[in-house]
């Protein structure tokens, strides 16, 4: 991808067919998205993706010219995937949409390593994002009636993903995902200076709380959530901007952020960067068959409010977190080969 290249790749009908067939073929050979054989084989299997797809994703990851990109035109077999479920819990697995989940994992393997959280959706590697009735008013991907305020995915966590993949299985009302990227020139230098310092607190969002996961083994789940609780209680202040001074990375989720009472500069800087991102915020309404890839350092994202249907025709996305480096989270993974943090 040379400089100035578009961040949208429209699959040709042939590419779309090949990708869909690959997903279906692989879904027969593996047991689930967490099948250790599948995870081992991912990079070899990803080599079977259309060449343009692989090159587009790899350029997106390596060149960092864009904060997000979209691969458009995947074939979704609406009949096969069936109605949008009411909840991710207690569904038969592998699910009917296992081929689409595999495709998303393959994309993850082109740009890094897919991983999950033991504290999110019961440790699944591919998350469901559809409206859940009980979450209607919550600040969760599974909410609906409230604006999902923009955020860095899992901003509170030192081992948050480098990329976020979202695949639209359906989106009949064109409900938009919001995306914001930083215009550094719009920030005063003194604010930039403060934002590069560790003077900000970010609390875990609710998606990691026990109430939003199944009650499993008591001791085991207590241990896992204790880690999250530690992150709430012994909060280490963090920097909002990091990396290059001329093109910084960002880490923020203002809804869950605080600045120390005795640090008005930090508060002013956070307000300034929040305002700059608010003004930059754009909308991307994923169409059925779109896959969105967000660079979790360069872009923040959220979702506009919408009215859920709860009749099996609701908006339905699949979500995968991707890291460039599994090793950095080793202290929080049970085994070297485990892809679950927490
Ligand atoms: N500002 C926010 N609402 N942050 C939380 C984002 C939602 C969270 N990532 C989820 O999985 O549901
Ligand atoms: O629904 C969307 O478009 C985005 C959801 C999201 O940000 C999330 O689940 O973390
Ligand atoms: Fe998100």
Image (cartoon, grey):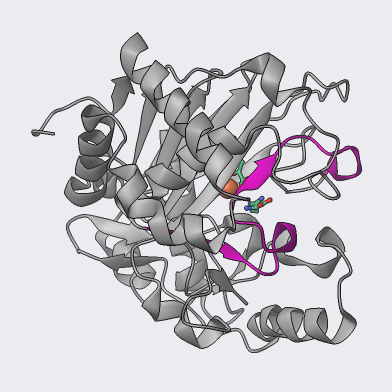
Residues shaded magenta: 113-137
Residue 26: image location, x then y, percent: 49, 39
Which residue is most to the top? 13
Give 40 or 278, whichever is nearer the viewer. 40
Regarding residue 278, the answer to whether it shows in the image is no
Q: Is residue 115 magenta?
A: yes
Whether the magenta-drawn stretch holds residue 109 is answered as no
In the rendered view, does 196 fall on the left or right side of 338? left
Q: Residue at x 25, y 37 (%)?
A: 54
> Hey, which quadrant is residue 220 in on the image?
bottom right
For the point 20% across and 37% down, which residue is it?
A: 55
Tell me if residue 40 comes above or below residue 44 in the rendering. Answer: below
Which residue is rendered at x = 24% and y = 34% of the image? 56
Compare residues 238 and 99 and report the one nearer the observer.
99
Residue at the farthest left position: 2
Q: In the image, is 68 to the left or to the right of 2?
A: right
Depicted 25 relative to depicted 10: above or below: below
Residue 108 placement (x, y as % from top left): 40, 49
Query: Residue at image x 69%, y 36%?
Result: 147
Which image quarter has ligand 2?
Answer: top right
- Percent position of residue 175, x then y: 63, 22
Would you place residue 142 above or below residue 243 in this image?
Answer: above
Q: Position of residue 171 (x, y in %)?
A: 64, 20
Q: Is residue 174 left or right of residue 306?
A: left
């Amino acid at each position: 991808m040379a400089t100035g290249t578009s961040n949208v790749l429209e699959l040709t009908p042939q590419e779309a067919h090949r990708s869909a067939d690959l997903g279906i073929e692989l879904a027969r050979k593996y047991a689930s998205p967490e099948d250790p054989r599948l995870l081992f084989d991912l990079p070899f299997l990803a080599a079977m993706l259309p060449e343009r797809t692989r090159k587009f994703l790899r350029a997106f990851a390596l060149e960092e010219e864009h904060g997000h990109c979209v691969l458009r035109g995947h074939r979704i077999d609406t009949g096969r995937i069936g109605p949008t479920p009411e909840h991710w819990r207690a569904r038969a697995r592998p699910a009917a949409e296992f081929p689409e989940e595999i495709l998303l994992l393959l994309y993850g393997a082109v740009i890094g390593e897919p991983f999950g959280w033991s504290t999110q959706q019961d440790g699944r590697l591919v998350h469901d994002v559809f409206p859940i009735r009980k979450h209607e008013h919550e600040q969760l991907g599974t909410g609906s009636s409230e604006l999902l305020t923009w955020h860095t995915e899992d901003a509170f966590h030192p081992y948050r993903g480098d990329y976020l993949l979202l695949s639209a299985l359906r989106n009949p009302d064109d409900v938009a995902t919001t995306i914001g990227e930083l215009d550094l020139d719009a920030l005063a230098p003194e604010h930039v200076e403060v934002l590069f310092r560790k003077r900000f607190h970010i609390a875990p969002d609710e998606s990691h709380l026990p109430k939003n996961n199944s009650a499993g083994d008591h001791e085991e789940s207590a241990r896992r959530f204790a880690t999250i609780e530690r992150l709430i209680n012994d909060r280490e202040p963090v920097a909002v901007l990091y990396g290059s001074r001329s093109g910084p990375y960002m880490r923020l989720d203002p809804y869950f952020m605080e600045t120390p009472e005795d640090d008005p500069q930090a508060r002013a800087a956070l307000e300034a960067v929040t305002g700059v991102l608010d003004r930059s915020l754009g909308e991307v309404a994923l169409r059925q068959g779109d896959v969105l890839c967000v660079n979790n350092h360069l872009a923040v994202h959220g979702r506009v409010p919408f009215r859920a249907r709860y009749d099996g025709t609701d908006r339905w996305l699949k979500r995968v977190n991707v890291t460039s480096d599994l090793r950095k989270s080793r202290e929080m993974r049970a085994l070297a080969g485990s892809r679950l943090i927490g």
